[in-house]
Image (tube, rainbow, N blue to C red):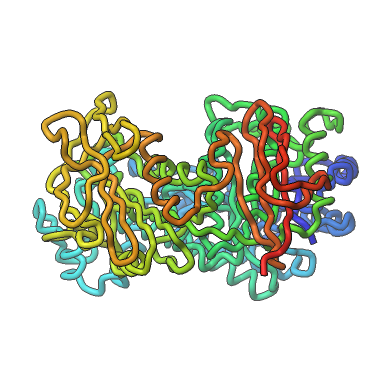
Amino acid sequence: MKIHFGGDYNPEQWPESTWKEDYRLFDTASIDTVTLGVFTWGLTQPAEDVYDFTVLDAVVARAVAEGRTICLATGTGAHPAWMARAYPEVTRVDFEGRRHRFGQRHNSCPSSPAFRRFSVAVADQLAARYASAVTAWHVGNEYGGACYCTLCAAGFRAWLRDRYDSLDALNDAWYTRFWSHTFGDWDEIEPPNALTEHWRGPDHTAFQGITLDYLRFMSDAMLAGYRAEKDALRRHSPAPVTTNLMGMYKPIDYHRWAPHLDFVSWDNYPPDDTSQARMAFTHDLMRGLKGGTPFWLMEQTPSITASRQVNPLKRPGVMRLWSWQAVAHGADAVLFFQMRAGRGACEKYHGAVIGHSGRDDTRVFREVAALGAELSALGPATVGARTPARVAVLFDWDSWWTLEMTDGLNRHLRYQDIVLAYHRAVWESGADVDAVPVTASLDGYDVVLAPALHMLKDDLAARLSSFAARGGTVVTTFLSGLVDTHAQAFLGDPPLTALLGIRVSEWDSRDPSVSNPVALADGPVVDARLHFDLITPLSAVVVGVYGADFYAGTAAVTRNAFGDGEVWYVGAGLDAAGVSWVVRQALGRHDLVGPYADLPGVETAVRLGTDGTPLLFLLNHHDSAAEIIADRDGTDLLSGAPVTRGATIHLAAHDVMIIQSSPRH
């Protein structure tokens, strides 16, 4: 048992003579896992009534003979050309109302009966044929691509009937007396797109309830397709089933998907080569989908991507560092796209373990092989290990959708940016942190961060209050707890008022160029931008005050004693220094600031092995070496060198250590 190592392999693009060389190189690089068949639907089903498994039979047989672990895809991430020609309704209708023709991917309507029938049938065929060879199943690929066709409109109405039961309830939830939008018949409801008056631009909508429910419906519609294929696989195979998620992907609520994934896998393609904090959060988010269980890093590039205007090359050592970062945050698999570079189409210059030259002496191949050797030597030490986080960050797709579609707010505010700022402050402090849904249990945590928690659902207000009352610390921000599950504003004092100990009477929204200094008590003076709450303290004490404008001297940051705990409210868009100061106060109350918190660029993370053994990961994201004073005795699992508490550790640029200390009892 060890961390799975390998990736997306497409031998169907190559003659069999190439396969022999590929597996020789795989042996050299310690590649033990291959993901097969991701885009083979057109090959395995060349016509409506024809299945041809000749090539895939050979591909799977070769992988089995070579002793590789197989993750087999259903291939349904892109439908065949014949399907689009025979069943034109299988292709999507876009936001502007245009029916797409065959091409690209993410081009299948999730409500199409034809697509559903054929995708389930091919999944059934694959499972019946290859069940004995497969370790894991991979359904579809990177689900996405909303559809606004008549089939989706009908599906939306059916989804709404099930959700609301009556038009009266729907009209009330959507606040349709505004602008005379009351619906008297289910068939009057249309998807909110560019052809309806529900939509007022790419970033906001006149009727949040309609658009919010369509986002929920589309996420559920794609999930229904995944579940149908999973059911077909399960009829023949007990192997676990997943699909590759895309981290912070706005169109799909992965929390709604999580119960239906046997394990989480995701594709890590950061927007630039300085995204280590963002990646840390996304790993934490993916790990949090299923209660902290380990995930698979299903895809990453070994060198460059091929999908952006600028595609920076991973510098020497960065691929290894980022791979170990994934392991540090919960990965039990480190896989690449792609194993061999294709000759044509849009991904021919995407990074690959084996480049067009087919050589084993390239820098990329040597780095991959060195990582493979490390993972093989490490063995089972980290497999199944859990993260012992005492800090939680709440992440909520509904709040994300609602906050960014609502009129009257600052268009420059981005939910992701706000959440990432607070997570980064914890990450830089050296505290382990879970990113969890608003439905997650808060037991076991000392600090809960709920930045920009715009929508307050179900019993969350009561659970946060109970958490604080028993001694926990809550940190939340502007625009939190203002609307219910239908995106309607609460009347009177919002439900969080007593917990926060404040009342927000107004807020000010300013251009990004406008800053207002905030003086923090016994702390720094920091900048605030974009959003400024005008706060009336009730039971809370003022911790930070504005320095400018007509509300100068009034509260910008407050702290409220609540039972045995306390609640921080940040009413302004503080800069990184301000966010860090607030978060450090919250963590410090529970002695959660890590011993390496004052070493910028050095990331720490802890996993507990299945036997309770603590594993401390030290990752140096700097281009230069770091000097660290060890806080424990142990052994570096990568080098075998002993580590002594109080001794100086020399961590080279982009280097990694995993210090194993004595098990906890």
The residue at the point 12 percent across, 48 percent down is: 505
Q: Is residue 662 visible?
A: yes
Q: Quadrant of residue 123?
A: bottom right
Horizontal side of 273 relative to 45 (left or right) equals left
Which one is nearer the viewer's eye here, 45 or 441?
441
From this view, report whether residue 106 is shown above or below residue 546: below
Position of residue 497 measured from the top left corner of the image (x, y, whole percent): 20, 59
Horizontal side of 47 relative to 117 (left or right) equals right
Q: Is residue 111 visible?
A: no
The residue at the point 72 percent across, 60 percent down is: 383
The residue at the point 77 percent across, 55 percent down is: 56
Position of residue 255 measured from the top left corner of the image (x, y, whole percent): 46, 61
From this view, report whether residue 48 is shown above or below residue 92: below
Horizontal side of 180 relative to 82 (left or right) equals left
Position of residue 110 measured from the top left corner of the image (x, y, whole percent): 46, 57
Which one is nearer the viewer's eye here, 529 or 660?
660
Quadrant that contains the N terminus: bottom right
Total numbered labels placed on residues in the image: 0
Position of residue 263 measured from the top left corner of the image (x, y, whole percent): 61, 63
Q: Quadrant of residue 195?
A: top left
The residue at the point 81 percent across, 28 percent down is: 362
From this view, report whether residue 629 is shown above or below residue 392: above
Quadrant that contains the C terminus: bottom right
Horizontal side of 418 relative to 616 (left or right) equals left
